[in-house]
Image (cartoon, helix red, strand yellow):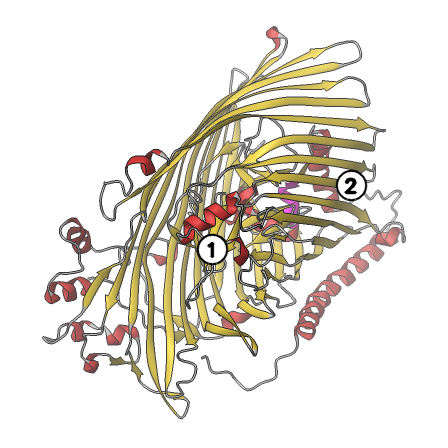
Amino acid sequence: MRSKKKFLMPSKTARAVCLALIASSFVGHVIAAETEQEDSLQNEEIEEVVVTGSRLQGSAQAVLDERKEQAFVADILGAEQISRTGDSDAASALRRVTGLTLVDGKFIYIRGLGERYSATQLDGMTVPSPDPTRSVLPLDLFPATIIESLSVQKAYSPELPAHFAGGNVNIRIKSIPSETTFRIGGELGTNTKNSDESPWYEGGDDDWHGQDDGLRELPTAFEQAFANDGINSIPNADAVSLFGSLNRDFSAKKDSVDPDVGLNLTFGDRLDLDNGSELGFLAAFAYKNKWHVSDERNVNNLARTSNGVTINEFVDGASTEHNVKLSGMVNLGFNLSDDHQFELNNIMLRDTRDRMRDRLLESTNTINEPDDERRQLDVVYEEREMISHQLKGKHNFPEYMNLGVDWYYSASRAERYAPGGFESFFRVNLEGGQRQERIASDVDTKYYFQDLTDDAENYGVNFSLPIYFDSSSIELKAGADFVEKERSADNIEIAIQTFAIPSLYLQGNDYAQIFSDANLGQPDYSVRLDDQTNGGDKYKAATLIDAYYLMADMELTSSWRFTVGARYEDFRQVSVPFQPHSEFFDVEGAELAALPFMEDEWYPSVAATYVLDSEMQFRFNYSQTAIRPDLRDISSSFYIDPLTEFLVRGSTSLQSAEVQNMDLRWEWYMETGENLSVAIFAKQIDTPIEMVELPSATEGAPQLLTANAEDGELIGVEIEFLKDFSFIGDDFANYFMTGNFTVSDSEVNICSDINPDTSCLFEEQLKQALNTSENVTSVITNNSRRLIGHSEWVVNLQFGWDALSNEHSATLVYNVFGPRVIIPGVNGFEDAQEQSFHSLDFVYTWYPTYDSTMKLKLKNLLDEEKIIEQEGISILKETVGTEVSLQFSTEF
């Protein structure tokens, strides 16, 4: 364990107060300067002063107008709103939206439904995900610098994919500018936890820009061995040679980390051509290099004894993570006229994660061994990359009754490349409780090599035809949408068996020294390699969707608007497992014939809007949609969930969930820019896709099964508001508060009939996973419980101040969610729940000139920790620390 300096650490509250006082003191000087400036202005002769509203209110008006005019319930965040809260990517920005919570820093839960119940689009088009453990695109990939706005549509409309329940997130990237723009920005930051020394290793020369230089890749000699007779029974000399070709430089030496740095550039222009047309472009580049040091504790196994619940196995210790994010965007636009516009968007996003952990490992077999210490050393390296090319056109034909035609085509590739994953367990000698030179006895080492590539094409066309009558109008819409996605995945696992190595060569201070080239070169050195790659670790998969829709948007009077329509989707999906290191299927006959998953269905939608007056309106939406299994869900192969680090497998008999959605919303948009809305929503889900822990009597990480429950429901209320403080007095007109609250309840019935003489879909899937014919539903602790990932309440609050001179602004941002079920309990154990995380951030912005911005950000002022609890025990605990960063940007 890391040695601790002897000093008193203030409590979380005191620490937060200290940081807040420092920030408020800094802002206080600015306010004082503002007051002096105002007094000076008052001494001059000024006939009239008009306050037009805060910076946030002004920037929010455009997106509020868009939301007001939409036929379906939606929440929209503009670029200025995102900048105001200091959020660096789409994921962190979206947690400010009503009813949304952020999971694992990447995925959004909408209205308490897990990420599988939402969909993500890029400029209205489908793109693949580089994360094999999730069906949706990780939203942390998208830097805020390229985002024009984020739209979260919570009520279904037929032009959207039918995979819909929580909502649809559309990331709208910036288009060509209206004038020449050149902007450059930089960032410098750190984390309060980063002051501690932590374990690290020597990586590759290209790690600084997020690419492996070949150090971690699977050596060619292994590929040749797999192509021949494998590696399990090769001569010792060949085994030693192969082992020597792997990266073994995992020293885990304690070291300090560098500060966080970032850089972004934007350049664009619009040219007026002689024929009246316009040509424009926008190019953007962003780079971020970030470090994070933390303490992590994972409890892998609990047991119930006569003395209560005890821990069977846990790991606890230091973690160092290095993240590099690189993004590039080049967008081209050509406006032939106001009626004919073309756009070509090209985006490259890369997010590289490199993490090392050196932690204490204890279990019921080792906790009473005073002279030994078990250690677990592991490294995870992954490059997530997405490249997307989008071509689209918008056309209006006045000569044909203003017929509108929009078309689009996108080709995208997403890849997760994770070479050289490493995990090692070994003993360390102790004397008097102090660690001595490491003795690497009982070494258990594994290497992992993973590569996943998704290629996707999405193309389609939309038609619209407005028809006007004396006192009403109707817009007819129709369209087609086609998705083709192919996936290729390969996972290789190699174990190093060291029981035959003479103990003389198992001594050293770190892994790199123990398995040095000098030791491997000894004539009596002996090692055994074990290929632990299983059937299905390599697989190929494909998804095809053909969709068509019809819709009518009718404004019957100045008060009533109705929108009705339906979407037809023909969905086909297959995932085929392969034998390890080969091109041969791992299944055959009837089992192979049963792999394709196919369904086709109509999905209706109806919406009504009643406009009471110029400020107030009511909305109602009803729709039927579906949540389909992802490629990972219909495979019996295991993958590691990145949040819990538990093993998860799917069910080959998994079915789609059918969803009925209802929304009722009242909206009040005041002339002052203030607004208030209240919404009631309800969802009825048949055969929802849930997870449950597989019962096991062995130690080690628990295993989870993805399966269909019987039914589920969700009902809730959302409240959103924006209010300034002018009601107190004119001196407070530049202070405002905005926020939203969500209160909801959910229930899922795992198996409606738990009579042992009958069965249900969930029980059949569980029996198949456990390979048993006996009744197994009784192992479920709660046959009825809340939906996985559902929080009963979510709160978002912002308190802001804008200087009257528009040169300064400050925002205090608070976000918290209620506890949510992460792992359903079995064998009498309670459900494991992620605990509330009280996020308090502060952002101060100074505009020294009209074209430049200086921004100070303090994140997680309360120094909260990520915690998952089960039976009152923290089975996952991770320190987060407080982030401090300073940003500067200027426009030329």
Q: Amino acid at mark 2?
A: Ser
Residue 385 in the image: x percent, y percent?
Answer: 40, 46
Residue closest to the eye, 478 or 841:
478
Residue closest to the eye, 95 or 265:
95
User: Circle 1 sits in a helix, a strand or a loop, which is it?
Assistant: strand
Residue 567 in the image: x percent, y percent?
Answer: 57, 24
Farthest residue to the top: give it.
Answer: 399
Give the residues in magenta: 76-84
Farthest residue to the bottom: give it.
Answer: 432
Q: Residue at x 70, y 49 (%)?
A: 745
Residue closest to the eye, 277 or 586:
586
Q: Residues within 10 Å of mark 1 (few under 14, many from 20)?
A: many
Write down the residue under mark 2: 677
Residue closest to the eye, 403 or 735:
403
Hey, which quadrant is residue 205 in on the image? Answer: bottom left
Q: Residue at x 43, y 47 (%)?
A: 650
Q: Does 499 sit left or right of 550 as displayed?
A: left
Task: Give the mark nearest the N terminus, 1 or 2.
Answer: 2
User: Relative to 464, does residue 344 appear above or below in the rendering?
Assistant: below
Residue 881 in the image: x percent, y percent?
Answer: 57, 67
Q: Does 441 sit left or right of 137 as displayed?
A: left
Residue 134 in the image: x percent, y percent?
Answer: 47, 47
Residue 496 falls within the magenta-colored stretch: no
Which one is closest to the eye, mark 1 or mark 2? Answer: 1
Q: Does 725 sit left or right of 189 as displayed?
A: right
Hey, which quadrant is residue 18 in on the image? Answer: bottom right
User: Relative to 596, does residue 881 appear above or below in the rendering?
Assistant: below
Tell me the quadrant of the picture where the N terminus can be found.
bottom left
User: Relative to 408, does residue 369 appear above or below in the rendering?
Assistant: below
User: Relative to 433, does residue 146 appear above or below in the rendering?
Assistant: above
Write down the residue under mark 1: 704
